[in-house]
Amino acid sequence: MFCIQCGKQLPEGAKFCTSCGAPRYGSASAKAAAPEQKADAGCKAPEKGSEYLIGTRRGKQIAWRVLDLMDGTALMISREVIVTKPYHQPGGSVTWKDSELRQWLNGEFLNTCFTEEERACICMTDVSDTDNPQFHTPWGEPTADRLFLLSIREAEQLFPDYDSRKVKGSSWWWLRSPGHDAESAAFVHAAGDVNRHGTSAAGPLGVRPAFRIGFSGLEKLRENDSTQKKPETVQKTEKPDFTGLFDRESKYGQSYNMGTLTDEMIARAEQKIGYRMPASYLELLRFQNGGVIRDDDCWLTAIYGIGEIAEAENGLEDMFENWMDEWEYPRIGIPFGETQSGGHDLYFLDCRNPGADGEPPVVHVEAGDEPEQAEITEVAKNLYEFLNKVLAGEITESD
């Protein structure tokens, strides 16, 4: 571990740099605000990387990963993105202290997703930061929070490599640190790199909350919750027969076919749109890399392929920019399917809430005047279930 200010190596367990006095991370350290929140160094420490189920959102338990240990507390971060939200919807200059996302995490999210017992175990944490290390944007003022986001330095130093920062569904996720200016915030890219330049705070990105909890509180919640010991079961969906899915004969049917799929094409597309491609989607595109649906009665009319070739102008990368920028669809995942409406509704792979197997549900999205006004309806728990419905003639209208 190295100092965030002067670069000197820190002794094991040090909270401040012995050379320049800077805080260890710049900084999210626990304070004992009440007896039930007190950090307990006398209890057995959990292992870094171990996971605990704490809290519930939309009927699904939230998995938290132990990221760091300090002063008898564990720093926890959600294993996956739990929601996609703007950092600060109104836009303009903002810091973590005044952001809407901070208010939501410590208000609605804290009070609706955790039990009273769980809330009592979560430490009140002194949260500070440093100016953006590359662009020198001021970070603001310290706060006292139960829930917060990681800083640039925490994200860079507490994960061993790029892959460890990636999440299922391949969302970008916010950091609390400022970006290149006062109207932006830093984030972690789908590929796992920390983007110090950041993006507009008014746009939606994934949220991975963090909190500190005493070792005793963590053990207490584990003992009181028998579900901690139950493995998460995954029910596999039967793989559809792709042979009857696409129009493979007409010239129009080939206008969406982007040719043979390669690893380079996948990497380029993921970098461009900011989401990692689900395994089921890649399996389909390896059979045929995009195409027009064979059944004329199906509400789904085409599935996008990946890549850019002269013969086909309807690739995912170009259409993604069109739907997000021109039509203002919400950035919730991968818009993979066109419909008979001519753009007024689409089918998405919803990367906000992937299943236990990492596969996102398929949702029908009807565009609104603004991204937040879109109507989103889940139609299948994953792509295979959706395609089985398509092949069975069950997707016949925009519902």
Image: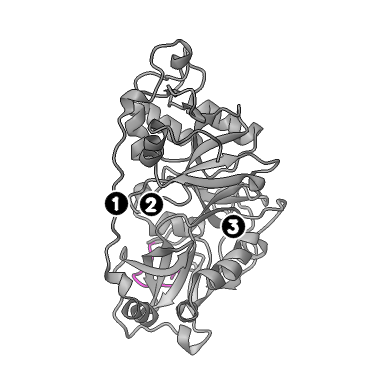
Which of the 4 quarters of the picture holds residue 13? bottom left
Residue at label 1?
235
| Range covered by the magenta-colored residues | 9-18
Does residue 164 appear left or right of residue 27 in this picture? Answer: left
Label 2 sits on what residue type?
Gly
| Camera-side mark, 3 or 2 | 2
Query: Considering the numbered disc 3 on the image, is that residue within a helix, a strand or a loop?
Result: loop
Label 3 sits on what residue type?
Asp
Q: Position of residue 46 (x, y in %)?
A: 30, 73
Q: Nearer the viewer, residue 47 or 360?
A: 360
Mark 1 vs mark 3, CA separation in Å: 46 Å
Query: Considering the numbered disc 2 on the image, is that residue within a helix, a strand or a loop?
Result: loop
Residue 58 vertical placement versus 253 (above, below): below
Q: Position of residue 385 (x, y in %)?
A: 37, 41
Residue 269 lies within the magenta run = no
> Are circles 1 and 3 on residues that touch, CB within 8 Å?
no
Q: Which mark is residue 355?
A: 2
Query: Considering the numbered disc 1 on the image, is that residue within a helix, a strand or a loop?
Result: loop
Name the residue rendered at 57%, 65% in the picture.
Answer: 105
Q: Which sits earlier in the primary sequence, circle 3 or circle 2?
A: 3
